[in-house]
Image (cartoon, coloured by chain):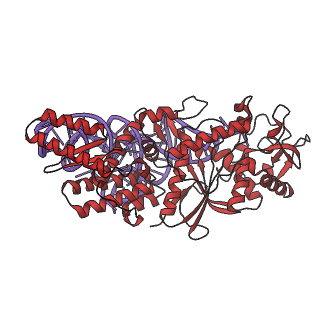
Amino acid sequence: MALELFDSKAQELRAFTPITPGHVSMYVCGPTVQSAPHLGHLRSALVYDILQRWLSASGHEVTMVRNVTDIDDKVLVNAGNRDWREFAKEVEAKFDDAYAKLSLREPTHKPHATEHIDDMVALVQKLIKLGHAYQAADGSANVFFDTASWPRYGELTNQKLENMEGETDASHGRKSPNDFALFKAHKPEEPETAAWKTPWGLARPGWHIECSAMAKHFLGESFDIHGGGLDLRFPHHENELAQSSAAGDSFANFWLHNALVTINGNKMSKSLGNGVSVEQLTEAGSWGAIRYWLSSAQYRSNLDYSESSIRDAQAALDRIVGFLKRTTNTRRVEVDFDFIPLEFKEAMDSDLNVPGALAVIHERVRAGNTAFDGKDEAKLSECVEQVKAMMAVLGLTFAYQEPLYTEEFSKQVEDLIQKRHEAKMAKDFARADEIRVELEELGVTLNDMKDITMWSFNG
RNA sequence: GGUGGAGUGGCUGAGCGGCCCAAAGCAACAGCCUGCAAAGCUGUCAACCCACGGGUUCAAAUCCCGUCUCCACCUCCA
């Protein structure tokens, strides 16, 4: 069975075949760095991180571009009196920090909009030449895409122009309320640093043109996958598609849209004031638990946050980590993708069914625990290998660490266990419990089995 | 008004024509293990036929029609 992905343009599951065999190119809309990240941003980035990991695990070389929109109305507004560039960098650092803590892979390219103004100008010039864009009638540096000139407009979201509500304050030299800005003329109240010289005058780029230009710059006229949040489908992605295809590019072969994070059934967003901060999350559980939770619904399903979400995810994750800890103290197993069970592969190939994949992990954990208790070494090894490989594919390896301790420490622990054993033999349980507490303080968890006491280190 | 999507056990959440008397996790209960715990294992708990009403089919949670409720998008949004 091969990978199938839901293409939201075709509105159906399609067998995924890369344009260039063995190589996958993907573009994912990254954040507009206007305010600190929330759960929704994290989910979106994570979805494509897992896709990237699965594609490479299954033998593809992946080029992934995730942009940073560092110039935008909101960036300028939220910067207040500060230099907006400094502000944007600061916010970007918060995103980078959260991404790193979630253990996201670095994208191959992480372009900033402000670094690609020339690419955008070139693309817009081409659109004007082809009759799909025009400079504002009022003579300003505003440049708009001419939606009326592009009959395919609306093809991504299956909408017709006459049903669209369009920009309410249509002016600024637009021919139609549906036309969207490619470049926005410099406004006197905005800093000069936020304006670039273009053939039409001082201006800054509109949001949509950025992604078209950067995708083309790094991936060419056609590429495999374009991803982003469901809320970007319209207008952002619709407009990207219109611009790029009007300019003659075939653009993305697959469009992927991840569903949103909701809270009490409603979209999490700044305007509703229902965002959950990173602080709130980390109080409830580790970053591993946050990643686990964000993975726990298929990417096209809404994921509803509640107070117990992260706590429950932590418990589920601890079960897996606990298994690895209790069983791998004296074993070292290399991760190998050949160890991945077929059921896991099938789940992942089925439009990234991560919850189904997690179910396979838990099933293997139970089998492994049973093998461990029954001292079935061969079976245990197999389960450990499988669980580790699957955890690696899902990017959850960072949630546990190989126990690192010195020989000396090991000897100290084993001495204490021996003393505890002696105390137990003497029925001095108070002393035995004291030693257990002492070991716990050292970070050691005991596991009393029938004839032997095992221990694991949580360092 | 237009365009997409959703309604599955106490909670989260898979399944999308037969392998479903519906995965997995969390929560809860009991047993095993233990000096007692923890962890683990086993079992139970649980979905009154998977929102409701019709229909198609030898067969439906899964397809079709209708109804109700909810969500997202329609030029800020991951």
Q: Is residue A377 above or below residue A158?
A: below
Q: Is residue A21 above or below residue B15?
A: below
Which chain is tinted red?
A
- Of residues A431 and A147, the one nearer the viewer is A431
**Which percent across, then down, holds residue B71?**
54, 36
| View extreme (front): residue | A408
| View extreme (bottom): residue | A21
Q: Colour of chain B?
A: purple
- Of residues A77 and A410, the one nearer the viewer is A410
Q: Is residue A424 above or below residue A402?
A: above
Residue A175 makes an appearance in the image: no
- Of residues A438 and A41, the one nearer the viewer is A438
**Which percent across, then down, holds residue A424?**
11, 40
| View extreme (right): residue | A139
Q: Quadrant of residue A270?
A: top right
Question: Which quarter of the rendering shows the N terminus of chain A?
Answer: bottom left
